[in-house]
Amino acid sequence: MQLQQLAYFVAVAEIRHFTQAAESLGIAQPSLSKQIRTLESELGAALFSRARGNITLTPAGEALLPLAKRILADVDTARVEVQELAGLVRGRVRLGATPSLCAGLLADALRRFHDAYPGIRLIVEEGGSRDLVRDLTRGHLDLALVILPLADDTPLVTTPILRENLVVAMPADHRPRRSPMTIEDLQGRDLVMFRSGYDLREATITACRTAGFEPRFAVEGGEMDAVLRFVEAGLGLAVVPSMVLAGRPGLRGIALTASDPLPFPVRRDLPPPPGLQRTIAIAHRKDVSLTHAAKAFHTTLETYLTEAAADGALPTGVHHLRGGSAG
């Protein structure tokens, strides 16, 4: 089995057309077909069904596809790792982050890293936490800032770094029935909901169902910017991290609290009440060593957060979990 054959297989699997796949790879279609046949012969199973000109994956092809993608991603990472031996003069960091972080404090951390290592390419993938976990697991990212907890079988190492408050976003001219609000206060209210793949979607739905009611959606399916704009337009309320409201004068955030206020301060070593806060961790795969560039970014991010927490420069409602304090 050759890496080239796996690359050809992935191209056909994604495009579902031999001629178009050959064109995208810059090779002749007969050469592509020959390599695929050789791969199928070595594996002892057909990878594609070619009935009536429709190209579909066989069960063997379905099983091979995620493995082939992961192998090719790891080979690409290995190539970059060797290049970095020149001393971080060149290389790359593929970082995934949630939209709230991309719009908030991440930019300053990226600037600090770029100033220290100008030859390292920074590739940022913005998405919901579930999407980022999937891409990280498949080898498409080196690091990702994800929301805890993760599934028990997720093959990732996670380091909690931040805890941020969740608030109810509403138009700035809207007067809440009370402040702070509880999850129960959302019952019967129109909500703006994120698309699937956002942890905030599942967290909000779960919190509502735990409180004994089914949430009512006025509109659903948006990314962070779209959700905030829909709230500004008065379509409904949304549960969002407090940091995303910075620089949005058209919105206000109302704190969420437990149904029955606790008679004592919440201890830092205990988990927060469900639905009120969320924990952000920096994650990477267990089975792959971080590249030199990824390690350098990890260190840069930790240093930046520690200093920002000490200076009181973290956004309101954001807490550093590595010895920092609330921003």
Image (cartoon, rainbow, N blue to C red):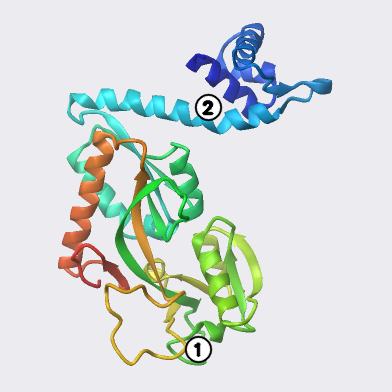
Position of residue 24 relative to residue 313, above or below, is above
**Residue drawn at 54 percent across, 71 percent down:** 204
What's the mark number on residue 101? none
Percent x, y of residue 65: 58, 30
Q: Position of residue 26 (x, y in %)?
A: 56, 13
Classify the position of the C terminus by image quarter.
Answer: bottom left
Q: Can residue 73 be seen in this snapshot?
A: yes
Q: Which residue is drawn at the image coordinates 33% and 67% (left, top)?
A: 163
Residue 225 picture location, percent across and down: 50, 61
Identify the residue shown where x is 55% and y is 65%: 202
Quarter of the figure with residue 22: top right
Say which amino acid is labelled 1. Answer: Arg
Q: Is residue 148 above or below residue 185?
A: above
* Residue type pointed to by label 2: Ala
Q: Give the quarter of the image for residue 264.
A: bottom left
Residue 223 located left or right of residue 281: right
| Residue designated by label 1 | 175
Which element type, helix, strand or loop, lies under badge 2? helix
Q: Which residue is mark 2?
A: 68
